[in-house]
Image (cartoon, grey):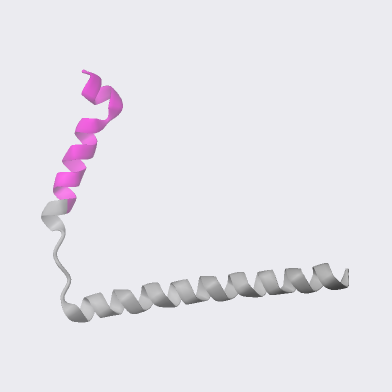
Amino acid sequence: MAWRVLGLFDFLRSTTKMLAVAHKSDRQEFILYLKLVLMGLATAGTLGFIVQFIGSILKVSG
């Protein structure tokens, strides 16, 4: 009964279904995902740097 309240049974069932469908990616797919993740990190880092840089310029001049 407590399992149903916590939703643990549903979580375990959906996890089992997901693992049955999942597959290990090959090297080419892994490289693609790696490039996408690195591009996202670079974009977020660049945007953070620009915001920090503009903030420091406004702080000095204002």
Determine if the magenta segment contains residue 11: yes
Q: Determine the residue positioned at 81% across, 67% down.
A: 59
Can you name the residue that lies furthest to the top here? 1
Q: x, y (%) of residue 2? A: 24, 19
In this view, 9 is above or below 51? above
| Residue lying furthest right | 62
Residue drawn at (45%, 73%), measured in percent from left and top?
Answer: 40
- Which region is colored magenta? 1-18
Residue 37 x/y as whole percent: 38, 72
Check residue 32 for magenta coloring.
Answer: no
User: What quarter of the picture does the C terminus occupy?
Assistant: bottom right
Give the x, y percent position of residue 61: 87, 73
Left or right, 24 with respect to 61, comes to left
Residue 49 image point, x, y percent: 62, 73
Total marks shown come to 0
Q: Residue at x 14, y 64 (%)?
A: 23
Q: Quadrant of the N terminus?
A: top left
Please state which of residues 8 and 60 is positioned toward the viewer in this rendering: 60
The answer to whether residue 23 is above or below residue 9 is below
Of the pair 2 and 48, the residue shown nearer to us: 48
Please say if 35 is above or below 9: below
Give 38 or 36, whichever is nearer the viewer. 38
Q: Residue furthest front?
A: 60
Q: Is residue 52 left or right of residue 27?
A: right
Q: Which quadrant of the structure image shows residue 29?
A: bottom left
Residue plotted at (14% across, 57% down): 21
- Taken as a whole, is the magenta stretch helix, strand or loop? helix
In the picture, measured across the screen, residue 56 lies left or right of residue 45, that is right
